[in-house]
Amino acid sequence: MQTKAAPPISFLQGRSTLALIEAYFELNHLKQLYRQGWLRVGLARERCESVAEHSFGVALLGLFLADSYFPEADASKVVRIALLHDLGEAYVGDITPHDPVSREEKLQREQQAVERILAKLPRGAEYLALWREYEHGTSFEARLVRQVDRLEMGLQATIYEHQGAGDLSQFFASVHKALETPELKSVLAELEKLRPGVQGH
């Protein structure tokens, strides 16, 4: 698992501090952790986004999409789920579909990590419930964030293509599979027109 630095939680070894500070030192590793899928296709480390940058993109995109296209959605809940959805990667790392880890194993590892981080916080059970909603797709907002998670990847792939990363069509195939709503499919159709080499098609 390629990272910019070791997990900051190691700096607290043997020391006790506020639960809030400890949780921050844990989640801060998302800033150190590269999105492994981009590295796998040859993107240079200095250009590769971190998991935290991706989560930030998903949260803002989710907010804008909920407000613009999905008035029935609770936009605040969308943002909360988006901010929490990758939290388990702080301990587990960014496991991609190409890694030899089953969906069940990935889910189990990430749930243990999320519980470890959130259990110490006053409203940890509430946050954990939102994370579980996302993983199991048990609310409209959770299913929306799952789709936005992929759509954000498509947006990032388009930017990387414009920056010279080559053809990233394999990522768009994954986005197409994930999108369920006509609104998001229409956004993706517009995005695809912006990819290098497809103008005029």
Image (cartoon, rainbow, N blue to C red):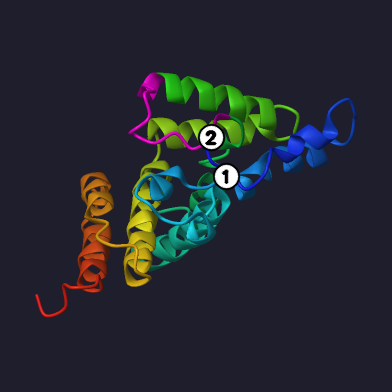
Image label count: 2
Place of residue 199 in the rendered image (x, y in percent of width and height, measured from the top left): 16, 78
The residue tagged 2 is: 93
Place of residue 133 in the rendered image (x, y in percent of width and height, measured from the top left): 46, 34
Q: Dot 2: what SS?
A: loop
Do the numbered discs 1 and 2 sit on residues whose CB atoms are within 8 Å?
Answer: yes
Relative depth, front residue between 70 and 193: 193
Relative depth, front residue between 95 and 137: 95
The magenta region covers 92-104
Q: Is residue 4 left or right of residue 100?
A: right
Residue 136 position by quadrant? top left
Q: CA distance from mark 1 to mark 2?
A: 7 Å
Q: Quadrant of the C terminus?
A: bottom left
The crowd level at tag 2 (other Cα within 10 Å; few <14, some 14-19, many 20+) is many
Relative depth, front residue between 128 and 86: 86
Secondary structure, magenta segment, majority class: loop
Observer able to see residue 70: no
Place of residue 26 in the rendered image (x, y in percent of width and height, measured from the top left): 70, 37
Q: Disc number at residue 33?
A: 1
Residue type of the residue flagged with mark 1? Leu
Please check the rendered image and state whether residue 166 is part of the magenta-colored stretch, yes or no. no
Q: Residue at x 24, y 72 (%)?
A: 196
Q: Dot 1: what SS?
A: loop
Please check the rendered image and state whether residue 94 is part of the magenta-colored stretch, yes or no. yes
Observer able to see residue 51: yes
- Residue 6 vertical placement versus 191 (above, below): above
Q: Residue at x 62, y 34 (%)?
A: 126
Q: Residue at x 57, y 44 (%)?
A: 33
